[in-house]
Amino acid sequence: MTAASQNLPSPHFPNHTIPRVWLITAATSPVGNALTRCVLAHGDSVIAGVQARGPDDNNGDREDELRAFWDEVVEQGWQEKCRVVSLNGRTKAEHILRNMALCQAAVAEAVHVFGKVDILFCCASEAVIGTVEELAASPRSLTLVRDQFETNFFGPVNIIKAVLPTMRKKMIGHIIILTGITGHLGTPGLGMYCASGWALEGFCDVSILSLAYEVAPFNIKMTIVQPNLEINVLTNRITSAPRLPQYAPEHNPAPLCRTIIGGLLDRFEGVDKPAKGKKSSGKLSSAEIVSVYPRLPPQMSISMLSETINAIVAIGGHENPPARHIVGFEGVASVKEKLKTVSEELEDFVEVSCAVDIDDKEYESEVLDQKVGSTQ
């Protein structure tokens, strides 16, 4: 058993009479890897999705981690409960048919081996750093915007589409989407990352007549899990667009995340080292497009992920799961503050908003008399 699996706090799974089958879309990510180990140790079965290494992908560590994971699977005797499949939901024109086929093949493998998919956990993610202007500065940087949505939005959408027929036929299922509090809060320098999260939120959100309402009659439940920003950003690939000089710290006082994240990377041992004498923050501020994989110290990774992992296993397959779960007091406080701001702004302009309803004056006066967020 690895140090990570030894030190995670004891999870609390919901009551169930038979082992569940999980489909985890990015089992090589730190979140996916930790969750896979946790549910296998509990006795559940897992279809573990892995992405093939791309030509520009220099993250050999993830391959080493996958080999170490499979060694543990063999050591613990989990081979019969775990299958590793190639999975990539991105929809670039030249790969759309192939990647949709991979999603369908992953679901088919689960049904063939285990007979069903009880829980789909979507956790594939990457972060593109750059201001809106920087990401529009060249055709290559514009491609980064598309790539951001391919991974963070279209990927989950495609695997969800692939699994729905199986869950609908079985009249049971639970889809869990890992996003972040960036689904509520914008972050300077992470505009496209936040936008891709908001798009996924809109696709899945139960507060509008969207996917969650569409599949509810088939007993398929949906949960959006929103951990703090660092859970997804600091555990997956970070790609930085070339910085424009106008957005350098000496010219722009906005707290851009490039500087903040670069400073965090400088503190981690084992992060890809830039040229001698330069710091990671300088690397993220390069005149070229650069990508890094943060290599978190093991104990930092354990402590950072444990709350999120325990939240997911407590929710996964629950008879009455929450529609949205925010992990950690910092995230809760941030979202509360955002909702408070929205309510205050709505209240400030409620008369202007209601002025357009010229044919419903009676209802308008009722709205004006009632404060936003109050109850009768």
Image: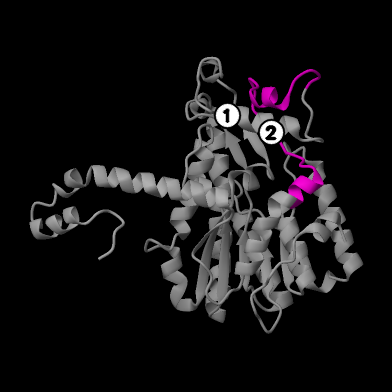
- The dot on residue 264 is 2
Visible in this render: residue 32? yes
> Mark 2: which secondary structure?
helix
Q: Residue at x 43, y 63 (%)?
A: 206
Q: Looking at the rendered structure, which numbered label has been put on residue 220?
A: none
Tell me, yes or no, whether the highlighted magenta stretch contains residue 287: yes
Position in image of residue 76 (x %, y %):
88, 68
Q: Position of residue 39 (x, y in %)?
A: 73, 68
Q: Which sits earlier in the primary sequence, circle 2 or circle 1?
A: 1
Residue corresponding to mark 1:
140
Query: Looking at the picture, does residue 100 appear above or below residue 239?
Result: below
As shown in the figure, which amino acid type bears the numbered disc 2? Leu
Image quadrant where residue 312 sits = bottom right
Residue at horizontal 83 percent and vertical 57 percent from the top: 69
Q: Quadrant of residue 173?
A: bottom right
Magenta segment boundaries in residue numbering: 275-302
